[in-house]
Amino acid sequence: MKTATAATDAQRLLLPCPCGRALAYGDCCGPLHTGTAAAADAESLMRSRYSAFVFGLAGYLVQTWHPDTRPPRIEPDRLGEKWLGLEVRATRTDGDQAWVEFVARSRTAGRATRLHENSRFVREHGRWLYVDGQAPAKARRGFKPGPAR
């Protein structure tokens, strides 16, 4: 007997992926979330993390966060938060380090918010991990991030 959750998960696979790529979730971030595929690059990991926030997949966020900077626990989404879209503005890869500048929009209790961040990623043992991020005001102009700290 199928549960309502299983039906919802199956339907989700056919919907457009929330990460903004022109693919169905099942052909985009879905396989990364289930562990049947790995992110090919830092931008793909960042997009899959955005989709994980949309769907409340805290376990995936923990798994893809570098252990040196990962918080002890990830708080569940704020009550009523709705993610509205993702715009990737720039990417840069230098060997096993990468940076992605993005803007993620959300709405909470009727109030629109924007998260504009330059995120830093590293590839360890062939796997991309989120390290940290900073607001662009703290980054150098022109999105020219330096080597990993």
Image (cartoon, rainbow, N blue to C red):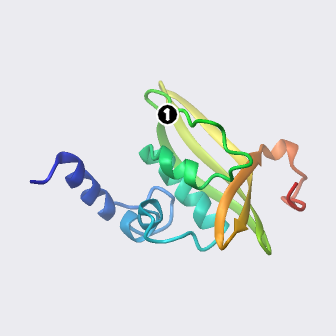
Q: Position of residue 29 (x, y in %)?
A: 46, 63
Q: Which residue is mark 1?
A: 76
125 over 131 or under it: above or below: below
Residue farthest toward the top in the current orientation of the protein:
109
Q: Residue at x 28, y 55 (%)?
A: 9
Residue farthest toward the left in the current orientation of the protein:
1
Q: Is residue 79 left or right of residue 47?
A: left
Q: Secondary structure at mark 1?
A: loop
Q: Residue at x 51, y 58 (%)?
A: 19
Report which quarter residue 35 is drawn in. bottom left
Q: Residue at x 80, y 47 (%)?
A: 136
Quarter of the rendering occupied by the N terminus: bottom left
Quarter of the rendering occupied by the C terminus: bottom right
Asked whether 80 or 72 is in front, the reply is 72
Q: Is residue 81 left or right of residue 8?
A: right
- What is the number of callouts on the image? 1
Report which quarter residue 26 is drawn in. bottom left
Asked whether 142 or 133 is in front, the reply is 133
Q: Is residue 51 left or right of residue 98?
A: left
Q: Is residue 15 left or right of residue 142?
A: left
Residue type marked 1: Pro
Q: Position of residue 102 (x, y in %)?
A: 67, 54
Q: Position of residue 132 (x, y in %)?
A: 74, 49
Asked whether 88 or 121 is in front, the reply is 121
Q: Residue at x 46, y 55 (%)?
A: 18
Label 1 crowding class (10 Å Cα cut-off): few <14, some 14-19, many 20+?
few
140 over 110 or under it: above or below: below
Asked whether 14 or 2 is in front, the reply is 2
